[in-house]
Image (tube, grey):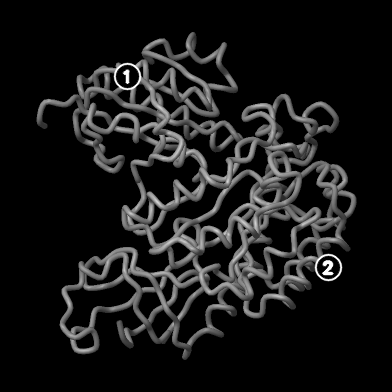
Amino acid sequence: MGGFKTLQAITLGCSKNRVDTEHILSMLEGQYEIVPESDEDVTVDCILLNTCGFIGDAKEESVDAILHAVERKKAGRAGTVIVFGCLSQRYAEELPGLIPEVDAWFGARDFGPVVRALGVTPSDLWLTGRHLTTPRHYAYLKISEGCDRRCSYCAIPFIRGRHRSVPMEQLVGEARLLALKGVRELIVIAQDTTFYGLDLYHRRALAELLQRLSEIDGIEWIRVHYSYPDDFPEDVLVQMAENPKVCRYMDIPLQHISDKVLSNMRRNVDGAGIRRLIRTMREKVPGVVLRTTMITGHPGEGETEFRELLDFVEEARFERLGAFRYSEEEGTYGASHFSDEIPEEIKQERWNILMETQSRISREFNMSRVGSEVKVIVDDFSDGVFVCRSEFESPEVDGEILVKYDPDVLDGVEPYSLVGEFIVVHITGADEYDLIAEPVSL
């Protein structure tokens, strides 16, 4: 493997963590040979783990990944194991004693110390540099760090700190470099994208940022994840409706609709405000696809409140919806002010009912698209089938559009050369997750 040491970075948790990993790897290029995360059987000099500490399931996944890395080290398939990220930030005192085989522990924002531990001198390159771990045609762009919200169930503010926007010029510079690497699609992310700019510019500047990003040559799609319903900046909807590069797609976690539960969650918005916002989005951006997240079993959610949530989901017809079961997290407002008295089996039962309801809604939405022609980006090609997405599907979280290769329609173009390119397809079938389509043209 040449003269370089080998390093494998493993990222747990959300796409915001993935951006952090990619910034760190950008400082290690030329000093390490970076082994893909998917190569589980390879022997490497170092395993670098970026962990998640958000909720119980995510913490368990991160701990399992650390233990697996330690086993690889014991078996001689890894030289050192270095751990950073949210889990090690949150449990900095406990983890070293519990898993002493790990060579070094760092917090969520300890980029410089991580790089120094790997024998490399940190530089300002991490500000805009990225070593992509996604397919080369799309990338996440993290526009801020931390959060000023104090939702009762969420540990992010005391793990990541207060909201801090990344300067717009820096983001535009980063996006330009990504475009030069071949990125065609940017997924704009933050703990709360709607808060962007308030600390730096004393105004909500997300719409301005979207406009600036859309002016970059090579960037064709821009989508927005993780928006907050309180005081939503409606100029963002103008961008979605009028700017052809801004996808008609919004990820806006709502968590609940019951006033009682929303108050207990400290969401600073009520059910009527949420309903107004959803109506406004659909009116101002015809055809918009909305993804949201809900929580079942939060303190205060009785049968009446859960039924209100189900009725709202039926009413709002979210095209995409995910859900979590409430997990009491130490240090949060919820843990100190409420009793987690709803049995786990009830939380699970409500989750099942909610997701069954959403599965039907998603299937009906997908079936409504049969017969239409859409522009898609090709994410992959395998076993004679293109794996694609339209502007209405975000990578990693939504379904896919599966297109069988037809050399006659595609003029005999070598199929792998189309990965990362746009084609037009005709949708012929659907289920609750995926669509089936035929190619129409390049």
Of residues 132 and 388, the one nearer the viewer is 132
Residue 274 lies in what quarter of the image? bottom right
Tell me the quarter of the image containing the N terminus.
Answer: top left
Which residue is painted at 48% across and 88% down in the image?
372
List the residue tagged with mark 2: 276
Asked if residue 318 lies left or right of residue 81, the reply is right
Residue 175, placed above or below residue 73: below
**Residue type (three-letter) at the residue carrying disc 2:** Arg
| Marked residue nearer the N-terminal end (1 or 2) | 1
Q: Position of residue 181 (x, y in %)?
A: 31, 53
Helix, strand or loop under label 2: helix
List the residue tagged with mark 1: 118
Helix, strand or loop under label 1: loop
Q: Position of residue 122 (x, y in %)?
A: 38, 22
User: In the orientation shown, which residue stands out farthest toward the left?
Assistant: 2
Of residues 227 and 325, the one nearer the viewer is 227
Asked if residue 355 lies left or right of residue 174, the reply is right
Of residues 406 and 100, the one nearer the viewer is 406
Residue 107, placed above or below residue 378: above
